[in-house]
Image (cartoon, rainbow, N blue to C red):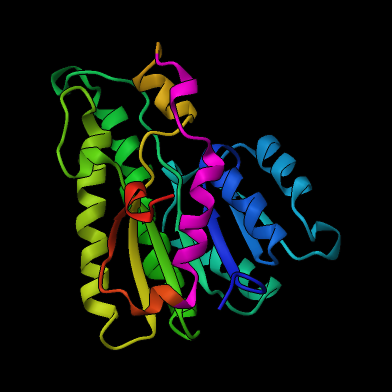
Amino acid sequence: MSVKDKIILITGASDGIGKTVALDLAKKGAKLILLGSNGTKLNAVYGQLSGVEKDYHLSLECDLSLLNDQSAIEIEAAILEHYGRLDGIIHNAATLKKMTPLIDLETNLWEKILKVNLTSQFIITKTLLNLILKEENGRVIFTSSNVAIQPKAFWGAYAVSKYAVKGMAELFRQELENIHQIKIFNFDPGPSPTSMREIAYPNEDKETLKSLEKLIPCYEWFFSEASNNTNQHYFKFSDFKI
């Protein structure tokens, strides 16, 4: 099993990890649905994808902070019209906004961060599972962080959301994996040179961080036949020994 001809939705596909993974999976023959809030950047990534000239891919502009059940149904309809099926989701999109004590975090910002990082993932997953569960070896990959294991001061609603996503992924796994051919994974990519990390560590030397390309084999493995046989569901980048 490889990613060739796999139909995969990637959120946060206009930048960072999502963009890097999308460009690689397209080279290997995957057919991608790119989801992102910045239409200009999203279209730029779409134009770089291998196979774009054959109409293999789909680009959907979507502000996850505004996502609701109806907009998720519209995403499902677009996927059905273009492909008729779906093999997996990579939930990459997330937002941090700023580092601040909880007591100073504005309520509207709290709500927006939780909507993007948690609630939108719940809505998209529960809506699109109708498609994924019809396929053999379906995949849903959530993105984690070390603050999901050990919350850190000043990481605010981001830390809360990642704590919650870890629990949500585990619930989906328990409820689905024993009765369907699906794997639910939660992946912590570790310190990576993304715009979000710049907010948290503005003075960090980026040369000390691994390249985003180092993450590609991890995502390929999640969609591989080898991953069918694992009982592990929470992974860190260090687990891959790359």
Q: Residue at x 25, y 43 (%)?
A: 161
Answer left or right for 18 relative to 46. left
Position of 145 relative to 71 (above/below): above
Residue 41 appears left or right of 138: right
Vertical position of residue 168 compared to residue 21: above or below: below
Question: Residue 21 or 94: which is nearer the viewer?
Answer: 21
Relative to residue 232, is residue 63 depicted above or below?
Answer: above
Name the residue: 40% across, 61% down: 141
The picture places residue 100, in percent across and down from the top left corner, at 23, 18
> Does the rendering let one see residue 13?
no
Along the viewing direction, whichever of 99 and 6 lies nearer the viewer: 6
At which x and y percent is residue 101? 17, 19
Residue that appears at 70% across and 43% down: 45
Q: Residue at x 58, y 73 (%)?
A: 2
Q: Is residue 118 left or right of residue 164?
A: right
The image quadrant that residue 78 belongs to is bottom right
Q: Is residue 38 above or below residue 142?
A: above
Q: Look at the image and give the residue range highlighted in magenta.
A: 204-225
Q: How many marks?
A: 0
Choose between 102 and 236: the one closer to the eye.
236
In percent of width and height, residue 199 lies at 39, 20
Which residue reaches farthest front?
241
**Secondary structure that dominates the magenta span:** helix
* Left or right: 88 as drawn, with respect to 79: left
